[in-house]
């Protein structure tokens, strides 16, 4: 069966510091990978998605970047965090099926507080 | 432009009764719809989905209804249990080049009272 893990689960970072959140998926090949953010009182906002190694699409201009160095690894980064980067970050995966809809499965989430 | 809308931020229901969560969409290209359940500080969990070729899909206590002409879907939970208390997100995707992306609503907080 497929599993997804992301880490760290919680972190508190000062403004201006760098960020690295990691995510790995097991049990599937060539998944679509996603980074979502849930800010306080808001819905789920898609930040980045990737359909293959080295292929990254950004949905929202921001202070963050994403990379996919391996097929089942997705990394969310920032060189200098802003207070507005605080939130709950979710990694997710899916497998595209032409004959049916695309169900996305989420990781456990990472709480980021920028102070 | 919010393409998926959940107009009720919260809903309170008595245990054993029916919970009805509603969702509206504006993009006529959406053809696949999903419901997710989310507890605080956890990732959303996939609950149930429906394709646009159907108007109903049932899985245990959960049933999703789709009204394409009204661009409306709903999730029914019968009977409701205290453990169902969570935020429920509606999501949609469109067939074609971007069908790997889901658009989410802002969620509805369901509280099931014992």
Image (tube, rainbow, N blue to C red):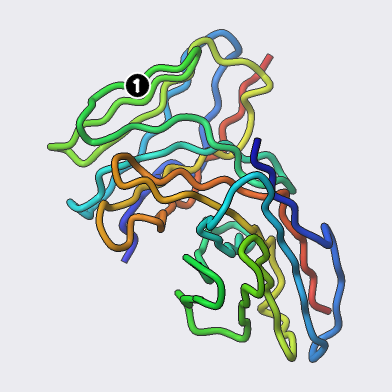
> Is A24 displayed left or right of B4 in the figure?
right
Q: Give the residue drawn at x 74%, y 85%.
A: A81
Label 1 crowd bin: few (<14), some (14–19), many (20+), radius 10 Å: some
Callout 1: SS = strand
Question: A78 above or below A99?
Answer: below
Q: Position of residue B91 (x, y in %)?
A: 41, 46
Give the image location of residue A27, x and y in percent: 65, 44
Question: Measured along the vertical axis of the image, is residue B99 above or below residue A67?
Answer: above
Q: Could you say which is closer to the camera, residue B93 or residue B106?
A: B93
Toward the viewer: A74 or B56? A74
Name the residue rendered at 47%, 21% in the picture.
Answer: B19
Q: Which residue lies furthest to the left in this view?
A: B69
Residue A65 position, x and y percent, is 61, 82
Instruction: Say left or right for A90 vs A101.
Output: right
Examine the rendered structure and indicate whether residue A64 appears above or below residue B10: below
Nearer to us in this view, A31 or A90: A31
Q: Mark 1 points at which residue?
A: B57
Where A26 sits versus B110, above or below? below
Depth check, front residue: B10 or A98: A98
Q: Kindly identify the residue that appears in the image at 50 percent across and 65 percent down.
A: A46
Left or right: B102 as drawn, with respect to B87? left
Name the quarter where the C terminus of chain B is drawn: top right
Total tally of numbered discs in the picture: 1
Q: Quadrant of residue B24?
A: top left
- Left or right of A50? Residue A40 is right
Q: In which quarter of the image is residue A2?
A: top right
> Percent x, y for residue B98?
32, 62
- Quadrant location, the N terminus of chain B: bottom left
Residue sitting at x 74%, y 90%: A80
- Quadrant position of residue A7: bottom right
Subunit that carries the residue with mark 1:
B
């Amino acid at each position: 069966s497929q599993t997804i893990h992301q880490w760290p689960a919680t972190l508190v970072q000062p403004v201006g510091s760098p960020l690295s959140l990691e995510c790995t998926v097991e049990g599937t090949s060539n998944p679509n990978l996603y980074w979502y953010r849930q800010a306080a009182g808001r819905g789920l906002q898609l930040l980045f998605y990737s359909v293959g190694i080295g292929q990254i699409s950004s949905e929202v201009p921001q202070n963050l970047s994403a990379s996919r160095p391996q097929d089942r690894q997705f990394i969310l980064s920032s060189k200098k965090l802003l207070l507005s980067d605080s939130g709950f970050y979710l990694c997710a995966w899916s497998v595209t099926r032409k004959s049916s809809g695309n169900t996305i499965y989420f990781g456990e989430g990472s709480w980021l507080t920028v102070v | 432009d919010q393409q998926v809308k959940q107009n009720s931020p919260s809903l309170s229901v008595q245990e054993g009764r029916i919970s009805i969560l509603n969702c509206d969409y504006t993009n006529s290209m959406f053809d696949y719809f999903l419901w997710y359940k989310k507890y605080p500080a956890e990732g959303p969990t996939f609950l149930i989905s429906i394709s646009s070729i159907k108007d109903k899909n049932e899985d245990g206590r959960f049933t999703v209804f789709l009204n394409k002409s009204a661009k409306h879907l709903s999730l029914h939970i019968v009977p409701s249990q205290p453990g169902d208390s969570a935020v429920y997100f509606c999501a949609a995707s469109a067939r074609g080049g971007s069908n790997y992306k889901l658009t989410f609503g802002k969620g509805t907080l369901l509280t099931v009272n014992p």
